[in-house]
Image (cartoon, rainbow, N blue to C red):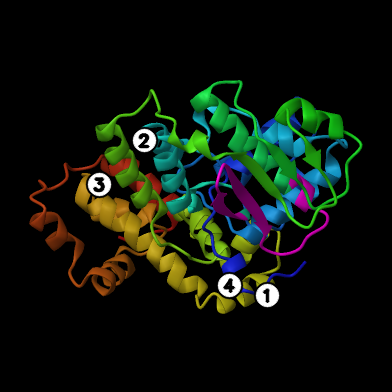
Amino acid sequence: MELRDSRFNAATIPPVLLTRLCDVAAESGVDTASWFAGTGVLPERLDLPQTWVSYRQATAIIRRAVRALPEGPIGLTVGARNAAVGYGLLGFAMRSCRTVADATAVGFQLRRLIDSLLDIELSSDGELSTIQYFERIPDPELVRFLCEQAMAAAMSFARSLLGDDTDPVRIRLSYPEPAYAADYRRFFRCPIEFDCAVNELVFPTQRLETRLPTYSEASRSAALDACRQLGGDDTRQDIVVSVESILAENLRSALSMAQVADRLFVTERTLRRHLHAAGEKFSDIRDRVRQRHALFLVRETGATITQIAVRTGYRDVREFRRAYVRWNGEPPSRTRNANGLPRPAAANPNLFASQARAAGIAS
């Protein structure tokens, strides 16, 4: 399925779901490497806090996973994992709220930090409240997994807050009853209807009034501030984030566009087309990554300017100086002096000469 809408290509989703899906696969002895081919997602970076993925990337990986794993309640298994740390930092903020209603409000306010790929809405009608789950794009192949995962995660988190005897009133699902429907009933412990017009989880409204034993105003405020900083407003295209990640890991090598495309399992032409659609040029992204790293090295380390040039992929220190002035409006020596840093100690000339020769740099 080709998703051209920019909303589906923006890297705004934390990859926790993908990480847990890979964990389930590992326990089943299933190799996950092929799931990531051509997506721009690097599986070894899923656990890094700066890693975000797009809806397009996540659904492509999940689709391959669902096809590769044995038939069964995969979504339930993934959603129920690690309930104690469910929803990560946002989960901690929710646990620190005064009541379930307050926690629910925080969860909806910052729901971007929840790794569900479904949109959710909460409504109350007297004694019963309902969480409805909506597909962003109708997808018969994935709807079952996505509903299983989202509802199992919600119930696991609720039980970790309120006790293991916390059950929904009923669940309605839009897809046909699977062969393993008994697993649903064992996990949710409530009536479940299939082939409905909606995907929804119904629970007693009075649950929202429950006070949480983990309430702490100080922890709540600190966690909310951290969540807002983590969430940010970054909607960069996923391909841009992937290119930045690869370049940052290989600055010394000064990778070409063709080499980066190879690492993303796409052709150079395809990579150029995706970057153009995102309003970016490869050279601009490379300069941006170099600028960030160079500024850090100049401000925070005692490396010489020549060493910094090598570490940021420049073969000629004069070319690096010109680039640095273009980026920052001043030479690196002035940046360093303005930060009150001492001049770097003289490096071992023989050691650096060998490094420079290896990099082909002219001093």
Q: How many marks?
A: 4
Q: Amino acid at mark 2?
A: Cys
What is the magenta range? 119-145
On whether residue 126 falls in the magenta region, the answer is yes
The answer to which of marks 1 and 4 sits earlier in the sequence is 4
- Secondary structure beneath label 4: helix
Label 2 – label 4 distance at C-alpha:
35 Å
- Secondary structure beneath label 2: loop
| Position of the C terminus by quadrant | bottom left
* Residue 269: numbered disc: 1
Percent position (x, y) of residue 317?
31, 63
Question: Crowdedness of circle 2 by 10 Å Cα count: few (<14), some, many (20+)?
Answer: many
- Quadrant for residue 167, please give it: top right
- Residue appearing at x 60%, y 48% in the figure: 131
Q: Give yes or no for contact between labels 1 and 3 (Cβ–Cβ under 8 Å).
A: no
Closer to viewer: mark 1 or mark 2:
2
